[in-house]
Image (cartoon, rainbow, N blue to C red):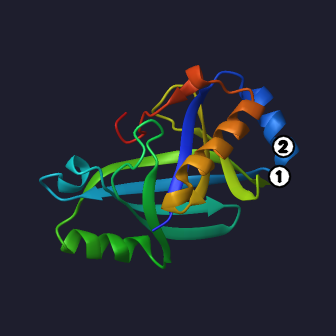
């Protein structure tokens, strides 16, 4: 199971970060409509696991993804192993999951500007995120790694953040779902 080596930060200078990101890659704007599921007793949440259905809307394209994340493997970054697959209908998937006893835990909409580029031979994605219910703009930088590459992957992510002018004091492990 690949690990999403990821760090998240609050962005103070959105315009400056966006300008630097555009030097790395073209911007791809998307809206993510996320629904997180759990059982009535909140077993997944209490164990640090996540089950999410994400609808990604970009221009006229619409993709639906089912994601399962296991507990955190690095407390400092909050990085988690994850498996993800494309599915057809979020409505049908919702019916199946609810029929299996899952409930909606949280629904949220993320407005995203994605930038994909290569650093240190690793494909990285930087995403500027706003969530209407939350104040401010966040920056997520990630790369997928195997479990023996987590330290190197996080070093690459830290390098990208540094190049964007994001310092350690800007980092956060806040979860959108907690807010």
Relative side of 153 to 28, left or right: left
Identify whether 34 is placed above or below 131: below
In which quadrant of the rendered image does the N terminus lie? bottom left
Residue 159: image quadrant is: top right
Q: Quadrant of the C terminus?
A: top left
Give me the C-alpha separation between circle 1 and circle 2: 6 Å
Asked if residue 67 lies left or right of residue 170, the reply is left
Task: Please name the residue shown 59% across and 24% down the image.
Answer: 168
- Furthest-left residue in this view: 41
Label 2 belongs to which residue?
22
What residue would you read off at disc 1?
Answer: 26
165 relative position to 89: left or right: right
Residue at the image position 48 percent from the left and 79 percent from the top: 88
Residue reaching furthest to the front: 148
Question: x and y percent of residue 32 in the render?
Answer: 54, 54
Residue 53, percent from left and from top: 41, 63
Q: Picture coordinates of residue 102 (x, y %)?
A: 21, 64
Front-lying residue, 61 or 11: 11
> Vertical placement of 149 versus 14: above or below?
below
Position of 178 relative to 148 (above/below): above
């Amino acid at each position: 199971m690949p690990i999403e080596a990821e760090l998240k930060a609050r962005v103070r200078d959105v315009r400056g970060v966006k300008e630097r990101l555009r030097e790395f890659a073209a911007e791809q704007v998307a809206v993510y409509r996320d629904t997180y599921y759990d059982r009535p007793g909140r077993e997944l949440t209490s164990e640090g696991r996540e089950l999410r259905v994400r609808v990604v809307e970009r221009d006229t394209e619409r993709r639906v993804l089912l994601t399962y994340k296991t507990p955190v493997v690095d407390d400092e970054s909050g990085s988690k192993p994850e498996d993800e697959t494309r599915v057809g209908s979020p409505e049908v998937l919702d019916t199946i999951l609810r029929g299996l006893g899952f409930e909606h835990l949280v629904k949220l909409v993320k407005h995203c500007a994605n930038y994909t580029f290569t650093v240190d031979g690793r494909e990285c994605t930087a995403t500027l995120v706003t969530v209407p219910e939350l104040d401010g703009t966040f920056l997520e930088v990630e790369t997928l790694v195997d479990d023996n590459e987590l330290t190197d992957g996080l070093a690459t992510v830290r390098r990208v953040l540094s190049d964007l002018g994001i310092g350690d004091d800007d980092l956060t492990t806040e979860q959108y779902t907690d807010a």
